[in-house]
Amino acid sequence: MISMAQRTTGRWVMGAAALVATTVVISVLMAGSLTGQTAVQPTGIPQAKTAQTTTPQMEAPKTTPKTAASGKAGDAAANARPGQGVTLDRLVAVVNGDVILESDVDEERRLEEVQPYRTPTSMTRDRIIERLIDRALILQQAALQPEDGVSDKDVDAQLATLRKDIPACKQYNCESDEGWKRYLGDHGLTEEEFRARWKQRMQLLKFIEARFRNGIKISDADVKAYYEKNMAPEYAKRNVTPPKLDTIQNRIEEVLLQQQVGALLQDWLKSLRAQGSVRTITPGEVTP
């Protein structure tokens, strides 16, 4: 019989391993725009924004959630003198003709704050832009290979779990509709925006798994090696007897699958960057 200490430690060890294994995939999926300005493909996967080249310098207007920052931008526009230009948004990168804007970076920062599976490392502006570029590349490929959409029922189920998993949600009582709405509002998001973003995340995860996961095979030897080299030492540090291998074999296989999917995804993204046209715009740079 497995003791309570074994079960608790087992959940911690497997949870930590799964978090490390899925960091690459999740970090890419959580980047992106929440606004309603993206076109929707038949598969439900929004298409990235396309660069505009009608002016010498790209200062593209964009609607963002009603935050203090957007309010200031609106005030600046209202108070501008005739003939005086007002910066509503800035171009930060172009990915095969699709643009990433400064407002996308701001939205990603707010999304990161409500991400329950995030790592504690700080997200700098440059890192956020890199994540947005990776995600734009995946969106472009997903649009070329239509997949079945994600059902509203599946989205509802994941969001219900999410509302319980976000640590800061407890003080808001996010399991209630009012508490969830207040929590998102305090992070500059609406329920509709966050739901759309999470559904898109699920759709892209489905696309990534369909592309990479089916060809991956995890052998019994791989599982045993992971158990002996990674899990057993963790149990030993806590002076807890590890569970038998056959009781957690399926969970170890899942961790190893995610690790390989993450590695393949990274290699694929490097290839897409090399084959395509990716350009980041430095602050103050004049775009053609």
Image (cartoon, helix red, strand yellow):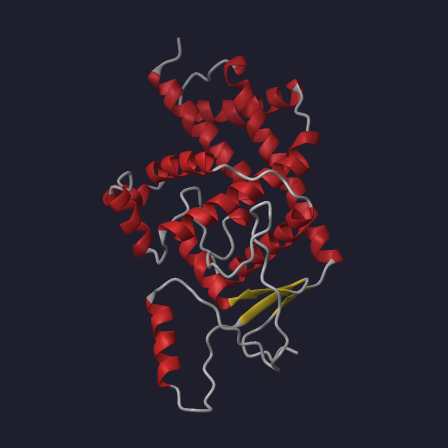
Task: State whether residue 81 is above or below residue 50.
Answer: below
* Residue at the limit of the structure toward the top, as seen here: 1
Image location of residue 9, percent across then percent down: 40, 24
**In front: 44, or 5?**
44
**Residue 205, image x, y percentages:** 56, 40
Name the residue at the front extreme.
42
Q: Is residue 38 above or below residue 90?
A: above
- Residue under the image location 30 percent in, 43 percent down: 169
Quarter where residue 50 is shown: bottom right
| Quadrant housing the C terminus | bottom right
Which is nearer the eye, 22 or 69?
69
Residue in the picture at 60% in, 47% down: 42
> Residue 6's quadrant in the figure?
top left
User: Which image quadrant: the N terminus?
Assistant: top left
Q: Is residue 160 left or right of residue 22?
A: left
Q: How many marks?
A: 0
- Residue drawn at x 71%, y 31% is 215
Does residue 259 sit above or below 127 in this rendering?
A: above
Image quadrant assignment for residue 79: bottom left
- Residue located farthest toward the right when viewing the structure as drawn: 275
**Does residue 50 appear left or right of residue 71 in this picture?**
right
Q: Is residue 174 above or below residue 80?
A: above
| Rendering coords of residue 106 (x, y %) | 44, 63
Q: Nearer the viewer, residue 44 or 240?
A: 44
What residue is at 60 percent from the left and 81 percent from the top?
Answer: 55
